[in-house]
């Protein structure tokens, strides 16, 4: 009998994290398909002990989408759930899954991802929320794209499917090491540039390239990419908003920032973020136009 759900993962040397991840989905009784990209620890054995089918994958050429899709082709469930080893499915939101699995078989769902980053130096933990499509029907046309920052969203939409939000939560806890993070940023920038050279029409890679530059505080490079995105997407209000943010905050050019925000508002009237940044821009210009106060005790 075909299972309702397949959990699909790619892993490498995750013996410390994998047990908690797999335990979090146990109540769903999913089929578990794990693609191992070269573990040298007990990861494959732990996965097998949890009933997973484990498939080795040659990762000498970095391609996360290919690794993800390698697992998707081996999943037999009607639906696919994707997790990383350092993530767990929040048990309080498990009941939200059942009605989705009984719904239309053309919709991918965004799950809430709560990212808890512990700085390896200061031991301080910060939490940020984002959303990612991690639940979608098992259909051959729904496949990941992108050697790094791989996503399935575009293929779902290209096949005529839909994307919807859900309150299902993923808890993502990880330790950050600034130096290893910088090395990864630079490595990903190189791969993204290779992708853009091979597929110059795929402007989705530019969003991730800007983010990598931003994380490295290479704001001039990030601004140039944001400008390029706005040129390639002239009718995308969000693209103009982000170009304006860079022109306002990181590479100050107030004239261009105002033009960016006004264009965003033209495309999306009432756009609250654009209005907020325009207000901030007005305050910046008004402050700059005020004369400096006299020093204490000065007389004229």
Image (cartoon, rainbow, N blue to C red):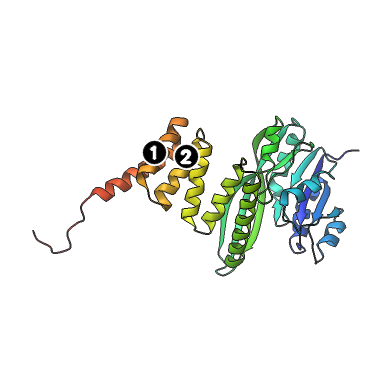
Query: Few, some or many C-alpha atoms within 10 Å of disc 1 (few <14, some 14-19, many ≥20)?
Result: some
Q: Are marks 2 and 1 in contact (CB under 8 Å)?
A: no
Q: Which residue is mark 2?
A: 240
Picture disc at residue 259: 1
State which quadrant residue 16 falls in.
bottom right
For the view shown, which residue lies furthest in the left direction?
Answer: 300
Percent coordinates x, y for residue 130 in the rendering: 59, 47
Percent coordinates x, y for residue 40 in the rendering: 80, 66
Q: Of the residues under marks 2 and 1, which one precedes in the sequence?
A: 2
Q: Is residue 65 above or below residue 60?
A: above
Left or right side of 116 for 263: left
Query: Is residue 269 visible in this depiction of the protein?
Result: no
Report the quarter where the N terminus lies. Answer: top right
* Residue at 66% across, 47% down: 198
State which quadrant residue 15 falls in.
bottom right
* Residue at 66% across, 35% down: 163
Left or right side of 169 for 1: right
Kindly report the distance in space between the C-alpha atoms of the residues bearing marks 2 and 1.
Answer: 9 Å
| Element assignment for label 1 | helix
* Residue at 62% across, 65% down: 180
State which quadrant residue 164 falls in.
top right
Query: Is residue 222 visible in this depiction of the protein?
Result: yes
Most foreground residue, 119 or 161: 161
Most foreground residue, 7 or 229: 229
Most foreground residue, 143 or 41: 143
| Element assignment for label 2 | helix
Percent coordinates x, y for residue 299 in the rendering: 9, 61
Left or right side of 174 for 80: right
Percent coordinates x, y for residue 230 in the rendering: 50, 40
């Amino acid at each position: 009998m075909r299972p309702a759900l397949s959990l699909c993962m790619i892993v490498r040397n995750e013996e410390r994290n994998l047990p908690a991840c797999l335990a979090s989905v146990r109540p769903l009784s999913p089929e578990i398909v794990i693609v191992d990209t070269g573990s040298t620890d007990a990861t494959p054995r732990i996965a097998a002990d949890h009933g997973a089918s484990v498939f080795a994958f040659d990762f000498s050429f970095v391609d996360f989408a290919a690794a993800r899709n390698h697992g998707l082709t081996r999943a037999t469930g009607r639906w696919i759930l994707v997790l990383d080893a350092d993530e767990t499915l929040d048990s309080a939101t498990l009941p939200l899954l059942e009605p989705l699995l009984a719904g239309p078989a053309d919709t991918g769902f965004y799950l809430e991802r709560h990212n808890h980053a512990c700085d390896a130096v200061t031991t301080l933990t910060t939490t940020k929320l984002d959303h990612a499509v991690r639940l979608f029907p098992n259909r051959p046309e729904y496949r990941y794209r992108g050697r790094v920052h791989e996503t399935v969203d575009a293929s779902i939409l290209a096949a005529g499917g839909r994307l919807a939000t859900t309150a299902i939560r993923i808890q993502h806890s990880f330790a950050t090491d600034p130096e290893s993070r910088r090395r990864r940023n630079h490595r990903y920038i190189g791969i993204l540039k290779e992708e853009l050279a091979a597929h110059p029409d795929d402007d989705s890679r530019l969003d991730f390239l800007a983010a990598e530059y931003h994380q490295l505080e290479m704001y001039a490079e990030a601004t140039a990419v944001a400008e390029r995105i706005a040129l390639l997407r002239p009718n995308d209000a969000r693209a103009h908003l982000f170009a304006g943010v860079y022109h306002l905050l990181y590479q100050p050019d107030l004239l261009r920032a105002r033009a960016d925000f006004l264009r965003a508002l033209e495309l999306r009237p009432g756009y609250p973020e654009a209005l907020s940044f325009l207000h901030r821009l007005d305050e910046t210009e008004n402050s700059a136009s005020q004369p400096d106060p006299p020093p204490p005790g000065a007389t004229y």
